[in-house]
């Protein structure tokens, strides 16, 4: 049985003090969740929040890591550094990083490998932009994203990957994919995994939906057989909303 999961992505929100307050509130509320719970925080929060959540079922993710192992890369944070904080996951390939920081398939392939080498579990994001959806190209886009950055992995490495299907037109826009659109794409992604790694690996791969998933629509999205949970941006910044989404899973 694959892992069901609700993961938050705080993006560039919350000072350290605000982040600690939110993580503390979550720790007090999320005691015995029926799914894996992860929060993705800015780098500077990781060590403090991971320490705070040590005896909690909530795990911590970085929102990025460098595509180099170490050295003269001023301002970068390596996968080894992320792992040394106690974080166990790393969100990679988010559309905002692809769009604003020009992260290519090749760069992301390196990041995924470095995350895995450092025992971080990647939450790898894929998804089409609005124009691609309108042109009916969403399947070829996600296929190319998988082939470009993660279908090089060995089966053993693949078993550490969580995918997040995030249609870019739905991120932070209030436009959500319909449950049927989400299910159709998730089933397609699972069929690609089956072709590449076999049916068992496909069955075992957790595929999250992300894009304006919130306390109101989460249950309907999660009711789909191939939607294993959510990657939550805006609604992960308020503990009551995030907890409602966790309870919906
Ligand atoms: C995200 O950034 O991963 C995301 C899904 O954002 P939002 O929930 O705000 O659309």
Image (cartoon, rainbow, N blue to C red):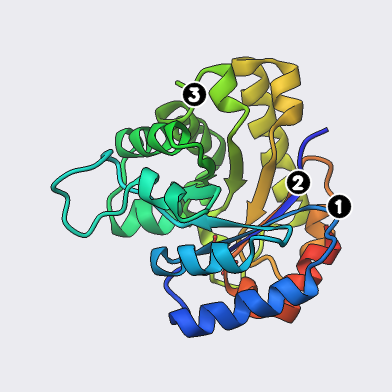
Residue for point 73% across, 58% down: 57
Mark nearest the camera among 1 and 3 is 3
Query: Would you call the spot at circle 3 few (<14 residues within 10 Å), some (14-19), or many (20 or more)?
Result: some
Q: Answer with left or right where residue 227 lies relative to residue 236.
A: right
| First along the sequence among labels 1 and 3 | 3
Residue for point 86% across, 52% down: 223
- Asked if residue 9 can be seen in this view, the reply is no
Between the residue at mark 1 and the residue at mark 2, the CA separation in whole angstroms equals: 7 Å
Q: Answer with left or right where residue 127 lies relative to residue 208.
A: left
Residue for point 42% across, 51% down: 82
Between the residue at mark 1 and the residue at mark 3, the CA separation in whole angstroms equals: 28 Å
- Provide the residue designation for mark 1: 223
The percent coordinates of residue 2 (x first, y second) are 78, 36
Which one is in front, 13 or 76? 76
In terms of secondary structure, where does tag 2 sit? loop
The percent coordinates of residue 56 (x first, y second) are 72, 62
In terms of secondary structure, where does tag 1 sit? loop
The response on whether ligand 1 sits within 8 Å of label 1 is: no
Between the residue at mark 3 and the residue at mark 2, the CA separation in whole angstroms equals: 20 Å
Evaluate if marks 1 and 2 touch, with contact meaning CB atoms under 8 Å apart: yes
- Provide the residue designation for mark 2: 227
Query: Would you call the spot at circle 1 few (<14 residues within 10 Å), some (14-19), or many (20 or more)?
Result: some
The response on whether ligand 1 sits within 8 Å of label 3 is: no
Q: Quadrant of residue 177?
A: bottom right
Q: Answer with left or right where residue 67 lies relative to residue 163.
A: left
Q: How many marks?
A: 3
| First along the sequence among labels 3 and 2 | 3
- Provide the residue designation for mark 3: 151
The percent coordinates of residue 200 (x first, y second) are 75, 19
Query: Would you call the spot at circle 2 few (<14 residues within 10 Å), some (14-19), or many (20 or more)?
Result: many
Q: Which mark is residue 25?
A: none
Which one is in front, 138 or 142? 142
């Amino acid at each position: 049985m694959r892992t069901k999961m609700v993961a938050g992505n705080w993006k560039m929100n919350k000072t350290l003090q605000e982040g600690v307050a939110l993580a503390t509130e979550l720790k007090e509320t999320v005691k015995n969740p029926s799914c894996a719970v992860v929060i993705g925080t800015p780098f500077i929060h990781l060590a403090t929040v991971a320490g705070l959540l040590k005896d909690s079922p909530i795990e911590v993710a970085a929102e990025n890591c460098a595509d180099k192992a170490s050295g003269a890369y001023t301002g970068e944070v390596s996968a080894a550094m992320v792992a040394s904080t106690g974080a166990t996951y790393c969100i990679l390939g988010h559309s905002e990083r692809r769009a604003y920081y020009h992260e290519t398939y090749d760069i992301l392939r390196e990041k995924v490998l470095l995350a895995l080498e450092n025992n971080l579990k990647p939450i790898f994001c894929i998804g089409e932009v609005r124009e691609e959806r309108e042109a009916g190209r969403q399947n070829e886009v996600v296929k190319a994203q998988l082939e470009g950055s993660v279908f090089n992995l060995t089966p053993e490495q693949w078993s550490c990957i969580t995918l997040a299907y995030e249609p870019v037109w739905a991120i932070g826009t209030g436009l959500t994919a319909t449950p049927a659109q989400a299910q159709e794409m998730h089933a397609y992604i699972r069929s690609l995994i089956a072709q590449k790694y076999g049916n068992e690996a496909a069955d075992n791969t957790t595929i999250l939906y992300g894009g304006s998933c919130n306390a109101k629509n989460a249950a309907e999205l999660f009711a789909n057989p191939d939607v294993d949970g959510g990657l939550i941006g805006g609604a992960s910044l308020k503990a009551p909303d995030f907890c409602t989404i966790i309870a919906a899973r």
